[in-house]
Amino acid sequence: MSGPRRTGAPNPGDGKDVRAVCVRCGTARPYAVAEPRCACGGLLDPEYDLAAAGVRQDAETPSERYFDLLPLRRPESALHIGDGNTPCVHARVLGARLGLDHLYLKDETLNATRTTKDRMAACVLAVFQEQGVFEFVASSTGNSSTSFAWGLRHIDGMKAHLFAGRDFLDRHQYTDHPGVELHVIDDDFVAAAAAGRAFAAEHGLLFEGGFFNSARREGLKLAYLEAYDEMPLPPAVVFQAVSSGMGVYGAHKGAREYRAMGRLPALPRFVCVQQDSCAPMWHAARDGSDRIRPQHILRHPRGLAKAILRGDPTNTYPYMRAITDDTGGRFAAVSDDEMIRARRWLAEDEGIEVCFAAAAALAGAAQLADRGEIGRDEPVLVNLTGGERDGQADD
Ligand SMILES: Cc1ncc(COP(=O)(O)O)c(C=O)c1O
Ligand SMILES: [Zn+2]
């Protein structure tokens, strides 16, 4: 295709003011998706005028409803790809089983491609369009790339190069679209990401950056804004399965924004759940380490929850550690048996079919409830981030 590939920072006078602020040194600049990091290496977070921000509850789509809290300048840039508007159910039967009277499940399996990553794609693709990015490179363990490929069906003239490790190839769907070019690497998804980055550099394309692309984090945030709005009580504890941590990062940022807007009284404790066969963040935290050390890294991770098989989260762990410290939360690790059991409970008690990553999040809640780390009266929110696709046990 033709057309501009990238533009520079948009004119700040054009539409809503969105600033990008470095979480490390505090430097602020106009938000530009092609600049994911500050010169100091810190993460750049979009910031909004929270005093003026509101939620348009009667809007039909999440990106219209939460437009004031998204890095989009113009309302007409918002994109809907069948993402969001998922129920947050009060799980009475399962809650009784776990000894939790206020257990809420955010059922993200009802997104168009059956994972919460559709929200990420809706936001990223809208921001790309608004900022004149029409060709980009990305990689993932499958769900994010699937959401991107799905999202491309809803816009014209955008091209994505999706890099996949051969072992994760069957987790990539909707790739039979003219805008999608799938690059298969004979290795794992970490190697696929490295190959994608090299390809982008060679061809002068934008590597969309995963965790470091704030539009991803902001899109994922909307699952939580919906949940905070849907729950009759503000959550005291939040659980999500963690790979890089971008979902929990968005959840925490959304909670801070909602607290500043008077929509949440306090921040919940965030619990980042990993599977014990691949739990580098949990190991580092247990060792009291503020960074991932060589002994925490898994070169060839294996596990039931394929979506979260990241053996080396060196670059993102410090941000996740800051969130657990800030909120009195923690990391948790769950076994295969705990995930299998949690998945069965969700199907039997609540009729929700989840992937193992989502099951891990519920297993984390069950583990902490069992240890008495959550009070029976505390409102608990579990993000069921993904469902089964085409009979695959884990997506
Ligand atoms: C279903 C599902 N749950 C959870 C995650 C966790 O991702 P992250 O920690 O990068 O937000 C992923 C990532 O691919 C996923 O696909
Ligand atoms: Zn900085």
Image (cartoon, rainbow, N blue to C red):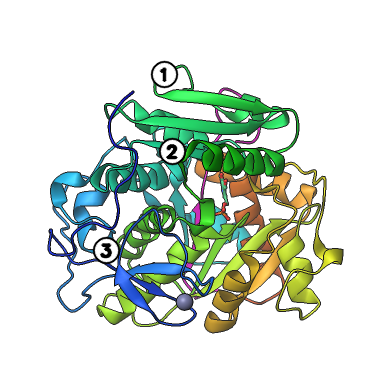
Residue 184 falls in which quadrant of the image? Answer: top right
Identify residue for label 1: 177
Q: Main secondary structure of the magenta part?
A: loop
Q: Horizontal placement of 231 versus 208: left or right?
A: left
- Is disc 2's CB within 8 Å of ligand 1? no
Residue 367 falls in which quadrant of the image? Answer: bottom right
- Relative to 269, say whether 127 is above or below: above
Q: Horizontal placement of 19 versus 326: left or right?
A: left
Q: Quadrant of the C terminus?
A: top right
Q: Which residues are magenta?
A: 375-395
Q: Position of residue 76 (x, y in %)?
A: 14, 45
Of the residues tagged 1 and 2, which is closer to the observer?
2
- Is disc 1's CB within 8 Å of ligand 1? no
Can see residue 102?
no
| Dot 1 alpha-carbon crowd within 10 angstroms: few under 14, some 14 to 19, many 20 or more | few
Q: Which mark is residue 69?
A: 3
Amino acid, disc 1: His
Of the residues tagged 1 and 3, which is closer to the observer?
1
Q: Position of residue 137 (x, y in %)?
A: 49, 38
Instruction: Determine the residue positioned at 41% across, 38% down.
Output: 110
Q: Position of residue 286 (x, y in %)?
A: 78, 75
Amino acid, disc 3: Leu
Say which of 259 and 141 sits in front.
141
Instruction: Determine the residue positioned at 55% across, 75% down.
Output: 323
| CA distance for labels 1 and 3 | 31 Å
Asked whether residue 392 is drawn in magenta, I would say: yes
Can see residue 240?
yes
Mark 1 or mark 3: name the one nearer the start of the chain.
3
Identify residue for label 2: 136
- Relative to 338, say whether 1 is above or below: above
- Relative to 170, say whether 77 is above or below: below
